[in-house]
Image: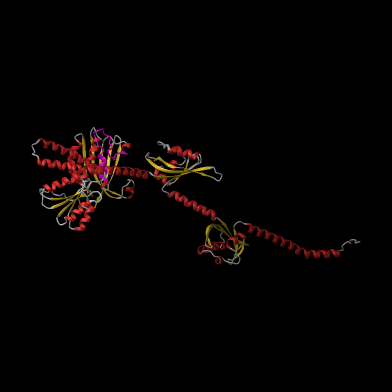
Amino acid sequence: SYTPQAYSQGDLALLEAIAHQIGPAVEAALLSEELRESQAMLQSTIESLPFDFFAMDLEGRYVLQNSVCRQHWGNVLGKRPTDLAVSKETRALWQRNNERAFAGETVEGEVEYTFANEKGYYHNIITPIHDQGRIRGILGLNIDITQRKRAELERARLATAIEQAAEIIFMTDPDGNILYVNPAFTRITGYPAGEVLGRNLRALDGDHSPDPSLGEMWDALRHGRTWHGRLAAHRKDGSLYEVERTISPVRDASGTVVNLVSVDRDVTREVEMEAQLRQAQKMEAIGQLAGGVAHDFNNLLQGILGHIDLALDTLPSHQEACEDLRQARQAAEKAVSLTRQLLALGRRQILQAKNLDLNQVMGDLLPILRRLIGETSTLDIVPGAGLWTVRADPGQMEQVLINLCVNARDAMPQGGRITIRTENAALDAEAAHSHPWVKAGRYVLLTVADTGTGIPEYVQDHLFEPFFTTKEVGKGTGLGLSTVYGIVKQHAGYIEVASQLGRGSTFHVYLPAVDAPPDQPEAASSERLRGGTETILVAEDDPLVRNLTARILQDAGYTVLRARSGEEAVRLFEAHADEVALLLLDVVMPKLSGVAAFDRIRAIRPDANVLFTSGYG
């Protein structure tokens, strides 16, 4: 067996010498192992970072990168930024930031990169590496914020769209307390944002008379449903406007309603135009009916008046029958006046348009207007200076003035003041927008205002309808204002009324202006009607008018060929082409109109003379 021996002094000295030799080596080995473990831990930490991490040496080469950096940019070790496939702008940005870091500055900020045609956003930090006071390189990291940045940009675009939207957009909490309104809200309602933020939508909508639809809206929202519909809203000044509202609940991830968001579209003008269209369609239908009846009635009246005149010409003036005939003629003339109103209503009158100065028309009519108004009322005339010319039928313009003044007179049973005013009105696109159906352009504005009783709103909706009247039975035909409406429309004009109960009414008539001076009045001809011996071809489908016309012409010495239709007129002309000196053709006839018949006749003889007639005249 082994028995240990005690070390001698020599042995101990030898061991001590060996220890001094081996100790540093062992210590160095232990330190090297710690360094390796430390480096491995550092590398593991760098690799686990969820963002780009890199280092560059003093020559600008990448000497370190983690896996995320490799995933985004590829293996860049040993490369410089100029070796990477990035845009010129990105490369220049890197160069500037790297130079600042090599100069000892830590650079931090959000930057936009374009790499391999793909755009991204990063939060970038670059800092210098110091060793004993000297810069040995730079460290950098890029935190990818692309998704966040895109969401921010999308929110910014959405916010800009909301701010610039023409529609009202507002947001409330689930209870209806207003949290946000866009500029359109202030522009349309008149409420500054500061006055409504924090207020409850129920209170705001209910400041004036609430719309019944609001109950339906809140009921839908209570059940978590979107509500869409029209309702009447009030501006800050109390005026009414119509909105088309879509209001929806906004839910969070758990499905809880956290907000209400609404889009209100101002449809006031749209509603007004719909009402105007319905009114125009109704007026058109009634006008067509009335105009058709008036045409046939006018033919009858022509026959009656013509035969009365023939009878008066043949009877001695002292006979009692002559007085009866004169009374009959007066009655027939009143009927003619009625048919003219019906034709104006249907816009079927034949216009004898001239270039007119409305001031002249108004001045010429002044004595008649004063007699119509009577002594209990005052008539003020305010002619506009430098008034533009209008293209209109003088007689119909007089009819407009007379009817409007009579209407004003009847609205002032105890007397009052009527003011007739003319002025130039240049309507731009914005001004025309506030007047439904009005086109931008130059107009002459005729205004007739009274200080009468005013017109209730429910009456204003029917004011221009034919046969609508608020007068007692037997005191009105209901054709006065509808006739005005028809005349104005036939002249491509517009008419509006503004009225308040107890404060009177104002009618505005817009007539298109023309660039021409007014026509000079024609001197009345003193030449007496004379007859002749030529041949005249008369084409008229109404036998009463046809026979009366033929008799009058024959009494004047003319030879008359009678045709009952356009086709017969063409046949008669073919047979007597060399004899016919004049064609007297009714414009409106069944099958072949007078105009169409004349086209065929001109093919036979281009120099044929024609005079068109119509029961609409």
Q: Nearer the viewer, residue 473 or 501?
A: 473
Across and down, in percent, residue 163 comes to 44, 49
Boundaries of the magenta span: 460-488
Figure quadrant of the N terminus: bottom right
Q: Nearer the viewer, residue 544 or 588?
A: 544
Across and down, in percent, residue 54 comes to 60, 61
User: How many numbered marks are there?
Assistant: 0
Q: Nearer the viewer, residue 361 or 96?
A: 361
Residue 543 higher or lower than 417, as above or below: below
Residue that sits furthest to the right in the current view: 1
* Residue drawn at 11 percent across, 47 percent down: 555
Q: Nearer the viewer, residue 508 or 3?
A: 508
Q: Within the image, what quadrant is residue 404 found in? A: top left
Does residue 101 appear to the left or right of 229 in the view shown? right
Q: Is residue 260 magenta?
A: no
On the question of residue 447 being in view, the answer is no
Does residue 525 appear to the left or right of 441 in the view shown? left
Q: Is residue 477 magenta?
A: yes
Across and down, in percent, residue 108 comes to 55, 57
Q: Within the image, what quadrant is residue 127 found in? A: bottom right
Q: Within the image, what quadrant is residue 310 found in? A: top left
* Residue drawn at 34 percent across, 47 percent down: 433
* Residue drawn at 54 percent across, 65 percent down: 85
On the question of residue 342 being in view, the answer is yes
Q: How is the image coloured?
A: secondary structure
Q: Main secondary structure of the magenta part?
A: loop
Across and down, in percent, residue 42 comes to 66, 59
